[in-house]
Amino acid sequence: MTLHQIKELLQAEVIYGNHCLDIEITFAGGSDLMSDVLAFGKPGILLLTGLTNLQSVRTADIIEAKAIIYVRGKKPDAQTIKFAREKNIPILSTPLMMYEACGLLYQAGLPGVGSLNQSTTSDE
């Protein structure tokens, strides 16, 4: 699923990264706790969060996220947008709640990061 398809599905506004809308997104995860994102995030993830401060972009950069979608209509401040530009991490904003945004993505066939963990663990 491309970031453009996700933008349309979630009725999202592009805050930064119009030039990146053709990137392929293969899984997503949502959390407002950056400690959880650091613990469970994987390179290539689409991060959904309501945390709009600089730490959200720093965390996305550390885990090598492909993009960030802020939920609940939230938008980051100018400093956070500037840092996202420096790191070339697209950021979007959707008016949807986290639960609804994640549910729509899952329903459209985009697996969650937890699905990757389940498919790679051995049977015990």
Image: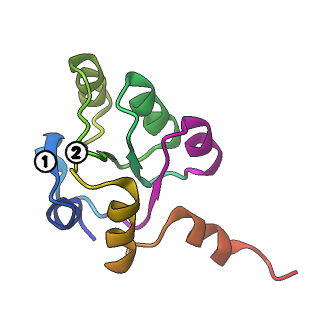
Q: Which residues are magenta?
A: 25-41
Q: Position of residue 102 (x, y in %)?
A: 39, 63
Which quarter of the picture shows residue 109?
bottom left
Q: Is residue 109 visible?
A: no
Q: Position of residue 25 (x, y in %)?
A: 34, 63
Q: Which amino acid type is shown beneath numbered disc 1?
A: Glu
Quick one: which residue is furthest to the right in this view? 124
In primary-sequence order, the first of circles 1 and 2 is: 1
For the point 59% across and 66% down, the residue is: 114
Residue that numbered label 2 is attached to: 92
For label 1, the SS is strand
Task: Based on the picture, tell me whether residue 103 belongs to the magenta stretch.
Answer: no
Quadrant location of the C terminus in the rendered image: bottom right
11 or 67, which lies in front? 11
Q: On the rendered structure, is 21 left or right of 37?
A: left
110 or 97, which lies in front? 97
Quick one: which residue is furthest to the bottom in this view? 123
105 or 84, which lies in front? 105
Task: Based on the picture, tell me whether residue 33 belongs to the magenta stretch.
Answer: yes
For the point 40% across and 34% down, the residue is: 51
Give the numbered dot on residue 13.
1
Q: Are marks 1 and 2 in contact (CB under 8 Å)?
A: yes
For the point 14% across and 64% down, the residue is: 8
Residue at mark 1 to residue at mark 2: CA–CA distance: 5 Å
Q: Position of residue 33 (x, y in %)?
A: 55, 39
Q: Position of residue 40 (x, y in %)?
A: 62, 51
Q: On the rendered structure, is 2 left or right of 8?
A: right
Q: Is residue 113 visible?
A: yes
Disc 1 crowd, CA 10 A, few/some/many (<14, 14-19, 20+): some
122 or 39, which lies in front? 39
Which quarter of the picture shows residue 50?
top left
Q: How is the image coloured?
A: rainbow
